[in-house]
Amino acid sequence: MMNVADILTAGLLSIILFFSFSVARNIHRTLDKENAGSLLKVLFPKYFLWSALISFLCLILYIVEGQDIQLIAMSFVFLGSVFSKYYLVPRINKNRDLIKEGDSMAKKTFSSLHLTSVSINMIQIALLVIILII
């Protein structure tokens, strides 16, 4: 039987999957490059904030429930969300703006930061699945 922490974990996994594979992808397919970038610039900080808040709540619940493996895995999910929101997103946005201004080095930095963000998201998905199956 699933407890509250597991239900929140499943919800967080659903949010991440939906946002990653539906929202972000379809924004790029539907809107022109400029508007897609502007919309994602607004959505991503909120996405990572909600991910951080939900994962933090799960952390507390896993502590209370004494589920150490889930706690450790969820700690990495939480840290990934906080790192993405407060470190990666501002730098990604800055480099996106620099690209629009014609800075050729910014494109390489943007690509590297974006790859890091996607990698963190994929690791978070894997960790959330692991939490739910153990």
Image (cartoon, rainbow, N blue to C red):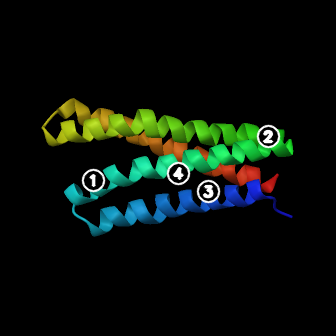
Q: Mark 3 or mark 2, which has the lower sequence index?
A: 3
The reply to whether callout 1 and callout 3 are in contact (CB within 8 Å) is no
Q: Which mark is residue 37?
A: 1
CA distance for labels 1 and 2: 38 Å
CA distance for labels 3 and 2: 18 Å
Residue kind at label 1, given as amino acid type: Gly
Q: Is 35 left, or right, of 78 in this rendering?
A: left
**Nearer the observer, 113 or 45:** 45
Q: Mark 4 or mark 2, which has the lower sequence index?
A: 4
**Label 2 secondary element:** helix
Quickly name the residue at label 4: 50
Quickly name the residue at label 2: 63
Q: Mark 4 or mark 3, which has the lower sequence index?
A: 3
CA distance for labels 1 and 4: 20 Å
Q: Residue at x 41, y 47 (%)?
A: 45
CA distance for labels 4 and 3: 9 Å
Q: Residue at x 68, y 51 (%)?
A: 128
Q: Which mark is residue 75?
A: none
Q: Position of residue 53 (x, y in %)?
A: 58, 47
Residue 116 showing in the rendered view: no
**Label 1 secondary element:** helix
Vertical comparison of 114 with 31: above or below? above
Q: Residue at x 27, y 36 (%)?
A: 94
Labels 1, 2: front one: 2
CA distance for labels 4 and 2: 20 Å
